Amino acid sequence: MSGSDRLEASVIESVFDAVAETAPEIRAALPGRRVESDRENPSGETVMAADVHADELLEERIGLIDGVSGYASEERETVVDVGSEPKLGSESRYAVAVDPLDGSSNLRSNNAMGTVVGVYDGSLPARGRDLVAAGYVLYGPITTMVVATADGVREEVVTRGGDEGVERSVVRESISLPSDPVVYGFGGRVPDWTDGFRVFAREIESELKLRYGGAMVGDVNQVLTYGGIFAYPALADAPNGKLRLQFEANPIAFIIERAGGAASDGTEAILDVDPEELHQRVPLHVGNEQLVDRLEAAVESGQ
Ligand code: P6P
């Protein structure tokens, strides 16, 4: 293995160690942080105290990793320089983008939410093809972490261990999307969808079962587990949809493509979308490839 391959493997392992170690702390703090902070994030959304806490914990741990030069999160305007100077002899070349607590509005209703992470080779904003790893923590009935690398997709159960920190056990390896899709989940309101998406949605509603929980991580995990499609599409008043390319769409697209599925903005693969700015939004349609292909055809014909 070359020196740069060793560095990449080390950075990826360290990032997911940091995310796993942070997860029990984030989860334990949720009950006390169900309140809105006095901040708005760069996307103009209200930030919960739990978002701020998760972001601070993750930046603190990820910022210490040798080889990581930048930390970016949905909650911060710009990329934080955490190591442009080589540390301990390693070159700092990877940037880590995080959605610290995706779906934190679900705190009020005690529903699932998660942490999304993407490890990019290079500086941000970046194309999704520059990702070398991506994953998410799902704070559901149990805490799980999905990790996608060039080698494939695995799922771990993460529990607060004894004095040694966290315990991680791999429960699913080489995950691929089931070939017979079962579930769907679409964000936004029917009147706000484009004509093409509405036609597609009407077909899907008679074929699959609705699973929409209001947190992308939980809904995508349903698709990864049972097969199907998740979409937060373009809306009449938001032609770029709601989800952020760097922090949500790219990492999820990387995971689902590695699991044999597809991810599209409606006309091209999410991972091929050229970024213009750090917090840009993008319509996201992700799941079984044949469903994403049908969606693209419907959106194109219904322009
Ligand atoms: P809506 C959470 O706020 C989020 O960014 C995604 O996790 C989720 O898919 C979407 O917004 C939910 O949006 O409009 O259904 O509340």
Image: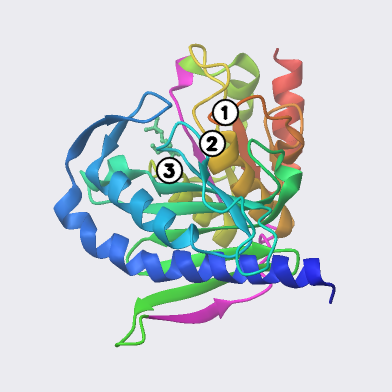
* Residue, disc 2: 205
Element under disc 1: helix
Residue 183 against residue 10 in the figure, above or below: above
Label 3 Cα neighbours within 10 Å, binned few <14 / some 14-19 / many ≥20: some
Picture quadrant of residue 175? bottom right
* Residue, disc 3: 212
Residue 144 against residue 193 in the figure, above or below: below
Q: Amino acid at mark 2?
A: Glu
Sequence-first disc among 2 and 3 = 2
Separation of disc 2 and disc 1 at Cα? Answer: 5 Å
Separation of disc 3 and disc 1 at Cα? Answer: 16 Å
Left or right? Give the position of 172 relative to 163.
right
Which is nearer the eye, 92 or 145? 92
**Residue drawn at (74%, 34%), measured in percent from left and top?**
294
Which is nearer the eye, 267 or 51? 51
Sequence-first disc among 3 and 1 = 1
Highlighted range, magenta:
166-191
Picture quadrant of residue 105? top left
* Residue, disc 1: 202
Quarter of the rendering occupied by the N terminus: bottom right
Element under disc 3: loop
**Residue drawn at (43%, 62%), measured in percent from left and top?**
61
Q: Amino acid at mark 1?
A: Arg
Q: How many marks?
A: 3
Question: In the rendered structure, does residue 180 fall within the stretch colored magenta?
Answer: yes
Q: Amino acid at mark 3?
A: Tyr
- Is the residue under label 1 in contact with that under label 2 (CB below 8 Å)? yes
Report the mark closest to the observer, 3 or 1: 3
Where does the image place residue 298, in percent across and percent down from the top left? 71, 24
Separation of disc 2 and disc 3 at Cα? Answer: 12 Å
Where does the image place residue 172, in percent across and percent down from the top left? 58, 76
